Amino acid sequence: MNEVALIIGMMLVTFLPRYGVMALLGRVEMPKPVFRALRFVPPAVLSAIIVPTMVFNRQGEFNLSLQNSALIAGLISIFVAWRTRNVLLTILIGMTALWLWRALVGG
Amino acid sequence: MSEIPTRKSEFITGVRDTLPLVLGAIPFGIIFGALAVNSGLSLLGGMGLSLFVFAGSSQFIASGLVTQGVGLGLIILTTFIVNLRHALYSATLAPHVKGLPQKWLLPLGFWLTDETFAVVIGRYSRTDDSPYKHWYYLGSAVIMYTNWQLCTLIGLVAGQAIPDMRSWGLDFAMTVTFIGIVVVQLRNRPMVVAAIVAGACAVAFNGMPNKMGLFLSALVGVIAGMVAESLLPDVPPVREAKYE
């Protein structure tokens, strides 16, 4: 693997969407419907990243049982985040739940 | 805010408001470093990704692909797809950073992450007319970046000593951090619909190559959110002064 090429390539395809849109849209007005749609992007993208890490176990198998520690800890984290609106508490309780569940139940 | 914000106070508040998310990035950065050094990347290569790419989830995915022996072009394409969401964060922030000079836009763009976006959009949504909100953004970005470099370094060193760190479940830190970010942002039912539909699609599309499923799921989620918004208005139209 040519690491320099890897870093430069990944840098470009990461930097351009981040900076390019910001710089370009400063000059042109964004249509209202586009702006409306954009509000749904963060929850949609992040949820699409989160949910597979919960329902697939460490072996990569689909697992909706008590034997899947990530599923249980994830559900506990969602509950904590929903009730407390506190990100810090969500992280602390979520990670503690994962380790406790693995130690006590497995998965 | 009762006091008049200054550059310094905005910067410090930006750092402070980002600290909870920094906590979630710590184990994630360490596990990335450990994964990178065990994937066949050199110490400098792993560090270089954090320094110059600075995108946790795609760095994570890329080192997994390096382990599998996937070629350079395909790894870069995957990175592009995973990071396309930043274009939409960037578009959301665009009206707020309009008029800033390039010397601000370049670093603020480079440092745009999920965490900083989540915090900074909250600051821009507050209606006070502080002229220094970009200093808040800078504070959030600088603390995220500094922390990411330190954690990568720790992970690279620790990963050489402890090859099987992934089994500790530290990668789950990304999941819980993102859960915290998303759930707090879900202000109305259409947003909940967008999140649930995107999550379900991501499971269904999981077998698709090169994380294409992630992009498609997000797209379907956004469409579902917009449909839900037009079907489930938060203020029922019945309450409008219809009979007057």
Image (tube, rainbow, N blue to C red):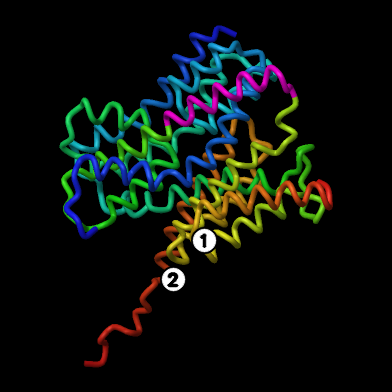
Q: Are marks 2 and 1 in contact (CB under 8 Å)?
A: yes
Can residue B194 be seen at all in this image of the molecule? no
Q: Residue at x 68, y 15 (%)?
A: B69
Residue toward you, B76 or B133: B133
Residue occupying image coordinates x 46% and y 33%: B83
x, y percent for residue A4: 49, 8
The residue carrying pointer 2 sits among few (fewer than 14), some (14 to 19) or many (20 or more) residues within 10 Å by Cα, namely: few
The one of A85 and B204 positioned closer to us in this rendering: A85
> Can residue A10 be found in the magenta stretch?
no
Residue at 31 percent across and 42 percent down: it is B12
Q: State the residue position of label 2.
A: B232
Residue A57 appears left or right of B9: right
State which chain disc 2 sits on: B
**Amino acid at the residue labelled 1:** Val
- What's the mark number on residue B193? 1
Three-letter amino acid code of the residue under disc 2: Leu
Q: Indicate the secondary structure of the residue bearing disc 1.
A: helix
Magenta part of the chain: B145-163
Q: Position of residue A37 (x, y in %)?
A: 38, 52
- Relative to B119, say whether B103 is above or below: above
**Apparent side of residue B24 relative to residue A27 in the rendered image (left or right):** right
* Chain letter for mark 1: B
